[in-house]
């Protein structure tokens, strides 16, 4: 069995700048790396952080930048900042594999998000439990 996904009618042409056809990866690998990053950072960290600041008023955001954004914009500032970090890492990873053909940077961005996300999810759950 091959790691390649079958082409579909929504696939970009190989010469399109956003196509992964000539990249040093497979579509499946790229998707699973980013599912992991989304789960760990995008869901785990964001959801537990929102739950902490919303339902546990004695706990304050520890990151000064995020605390400032939250004081100015509320939860939208927190979520917006986390989405901006996620988007920057996604763009870096995509650019690394598509243009630079640098597999180290390609893997580094989603794996860092995953590791930070899992760490802070566990940390936040611990804070919630007392």
Image (cartoon, rainbow, N blue to C red):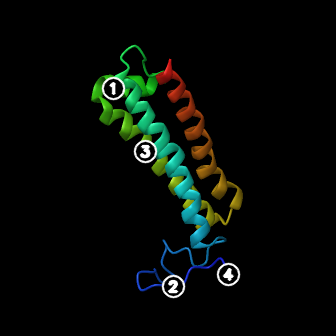
- In the rendered image, residue 111, in percent from the top left (x then y), is placed at 63, 49
Q: Residues within 10 Å of mark 3 (few under 14, many from 20)?
A: few
Closer to us: mark 1 or mark 3? 1
Which image quarter is the N terminus in?
bottom right
Please name the residue shown 41% across and 26% down the image: 52
Q: Is residue 26 left or right of residue 50?
A: right
Q: Counting residues from the N terminus, which is met first, the one under dot 1 or under dot 3?
A: 1
Report, in whole angstroms, how far the alpha carbon at label 4 lies from the one at label 3: 34 Å
Q: Which mark is residue 20?
A: none
Tell me whether the residue at label 2 lies in contact with that at label 4, contact meaning CB atoms closer than 8 angstroms.
no
Q: Counting residues from the N terminus, which is met first, the one under dot 2 or under dot 4?
A: 4
Q: Which mark is residue 2?
A: 4
Q: Counting residues from the N terminus, which is met first, the one under dot 1 or under dot 2?
A: 2
Closer to us: mark 1 or mark 2? 1
Q: Counting residues from the N terminus, which is met first, the one under dot 1 or under dot 4?
A: 4
Q: Secondary structure at mark 3?
A: helix
Closer to us: mark 4 or mark 3? 4
Report, in whole angstroms, how far the alpha carbon at label 2 lies from the one at label 4: 13 Å
Please name the residue shown 57% across and 62% down the image: 32
Q: Which mark is residue 54?
A: 1
Compared with 74, 113 (above or below) is below
Q: Counting residues from the N terminus, which is met first, the one under dot 3 or under dot 2?
A: 2
Please name the residue shown 36% across and 17% down the image: 57
The number of discs equals 4
Mark 3 highlights which residue?
84
- In the rendered image, residue 8, in percent from the top left (x then y), is placed at 46, 84
Q: Secondary structure at mark 1?
A: helix
- In the rendered image, residue 105, in percent from the top left (x then y), is placed at 66, 54
Report, in whole angstroms, how far the alpha carbon at label 1 lies from the one at label 4: 46 Å
Closer to us: mark 2 or mark 4? 4
In depth, the one of 122 and 25 nearer the eye is 122
């Amino acid at each position: 069995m091959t790691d390649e996904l079958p082409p579909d009618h929504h696939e970009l042409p190989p010469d399109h700048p956003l196509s992964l056809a000539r990249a040093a990866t497979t579509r499946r690998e790229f998707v699973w790396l980013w599912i992991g990053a989304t789960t760990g950072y995008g869901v785990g960290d964001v959801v537990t952080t929102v739950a902490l600041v919303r339902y546990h008023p004695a706990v304050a955001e520890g990151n000064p930048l995020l605390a400032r954004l939250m004081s100015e914009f509320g939860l939208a500032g927190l979520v917006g900042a986390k989405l901006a970090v996620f988007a920057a890492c996604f763009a870096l990873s995509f650019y690394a594999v598509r243009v630079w053909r640098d597999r180290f940077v390609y893997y580094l961005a989603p794996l860092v998000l995953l590791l930070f996300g899992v760490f802070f999810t566990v940390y936040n759950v611990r804070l919630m439990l007392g």
